[in-house]
């Protein structure tokens, strides 16, 4: 199903159509942060913990460098072998080829598949603080931002971007010096915000699985908060609207282009290029004529 959805087109639509009534149950959690912050290690710990609580977990890594591996050849890569053979866990890496828009749409569709087939929790790993994270933040319910001790002023900008989207802040590698200071600094940072949800700052040592239970507890609390406040439903509605309008505009555009025909479209383009008419005037007149 995932391959079909990733490939797009008619087959993808069939899958998503069939799954649609079954979606909307999974808790979708984004795990983001700088390269090497320990996102994959944290995900491994979270997955183990959630499995102990009998929850099924799907993992989507949106960057190839974030890949999880079943083998032993890739050195530092996080090994999911401990979970191999467990039917309650599914791990999928997605290539970032193509544009942010394409990636986030493909990710959204893959997340929907996991949701639709009944995974309780879907963890989505993304790197950095770019457009992709903001796009991914929109498709998840809860965003966990992973920081590490010893952040300098140079990462101030990055930090600001990530702080905006954080629902939970993790200070990973808390076995290292400066962890408390970083946690204090981040706590002061979130103090200043006026959101109803107080962003918790959690010290974690992912390699030793220390602090993982607190992260799980906060994930549950955040989900409860979203449901209680009506934000869960509101978010669902927001997503439905964005997707509907997106699909509608694509469908209308392609229908329009087919009806108009290549030659006519080329003619319109030519009129604009030769300064005979401007884009908006032409579009307006086409709409008025009901073309
Ligand atoms: N000291 C220490 N090292 C850690 C901890 N967690 C992860 N690491 C190490 O940090 C390195 C990166 O860990 P990953 O989990 O691959 O980090 P990542 O954020 O997924 O990395 P990318 O996906 O490549 O961006 C590995 O060598 C881990 O063993 C921790 O709590 N303490
Ligand atoms: Mg990773």
Image: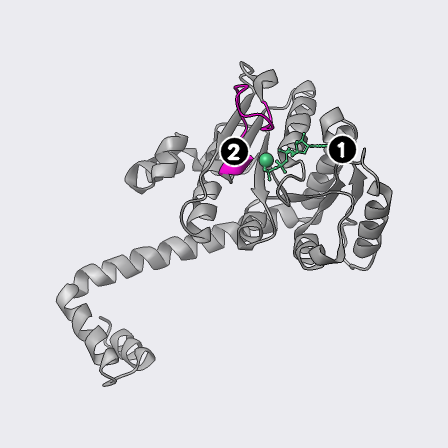
Residue linked to disc 1: 217
Extreme-top residue of the structure: 85
Q: Estimate how packed mark 1 is, as few (under 14), some (14 to 19) or many (20 or more) residues with alpha carbons within 10 Å.
A: few
Quadrant containing ligand 2 = top right
Instruction: For mark 2, give the secondary structure.
Output: helix
Q: Nearer the viewer, residue 234 or 33?
A: 33
Q: Nearer the viewer, residue 210 or 140?
A: 210
Tell me which corner region of the image, top left, top right, bottom left or bottom right, holds residue 48.
top right
Position of 184 compared to 114: left or right? right
| 59 in magenta | no
Main SS type for the magenta part?
loop
Q: Nearer the viewer, residue 127 or 84?
A: 127
Q: Residue at x 49, y 33 (%)?
A: 93
Some atom of ligand 1 lies within 8 Å of the CB belonging to the residue at label 1: no
Q: Position of residue 236 (x, y in %)?
A: 55, 47
The vertical placement of 158 against 16, above or below, is below
Distance Cα–Cα, label 2 vs label 1: 21 Å
Tell me which corner region of the image, top left, top right, bottom left or bottom right, holds residue 43.
top right
Q: Which mark is residue 115?
A: 2
Magenta part of the chain: 64-79
| 68 in magenta | yes
Q: In the rendered image, which quarter contains the N terminus?
A: top left
Q: Residue at x 78, y 46 (%)?
A: 150
Q: Position of residue 18 (x, y in %)?
A: 39, 33
Instruction: For mark 1, give the secondary structure.
Output: helix
Q: Position of residue 25 (x, y in %)?
A: 57, 35
Extreme-left residue of the structure: 263
Display coloring = one colour
């Amino acid at each position: 199903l995932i391959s079909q959805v990733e490939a797009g087109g008619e087959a993808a639509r069939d899958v998503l159509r069939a799954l649609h009534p079954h979606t909307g149950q999974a808790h979708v959690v984004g795990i983001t942060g700088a390269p090497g912050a320990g996102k994959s290690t944290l995900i491994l710990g979270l997955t183990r913990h959630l499995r102990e609580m009998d929850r099924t977990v799907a993992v989507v890594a949106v960057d190839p460098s974030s890949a999880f591996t079943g083998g032993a050849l890739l050195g530092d890569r996080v090994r999911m072998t401990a979970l191999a053979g467990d039917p309650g866990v599914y791990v999928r890496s997605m290539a970032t080829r193509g544009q942010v828009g394409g990636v986030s749409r493909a990710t959204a569709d893959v997340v929907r598949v996991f949701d639709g087939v009944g995974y309780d929790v879907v963890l989505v790993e993304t790197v950095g603080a770019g457009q992709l994270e903001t796009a991914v933040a929109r498709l998840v319910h809860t965003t966990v931002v992973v920081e590490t001790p010893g952040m300098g002023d140079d990462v101030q900008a990055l930090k600001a971007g990530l702080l905006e989207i954080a629902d939970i802040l993790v200070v990973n590698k808390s076995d290292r010096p400066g962890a408390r200071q970083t946690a204090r600094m981040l706590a002061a940072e979130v103090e200043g915000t006026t959101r109803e949800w107080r962003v918790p700052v959690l010290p974690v040592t992912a390699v030793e699985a220390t602090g993982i239970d607190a992260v799980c507890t906060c994930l549950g609390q955040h989900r409860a908060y979203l449901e209680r406040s009506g934000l869960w439903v509101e978010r669902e509605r927001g997503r439905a609207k964005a997707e509907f309008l997106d699909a509608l505009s694509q469908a209308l555009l392609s229908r329009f282009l087919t009806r108009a025909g290549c030659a006519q479209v080329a003619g319109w383009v030519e009129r604009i290029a030769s300064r005979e008419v401007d884009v908006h005037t032409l579009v307006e007149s086409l709409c008025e004529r009901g073309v």
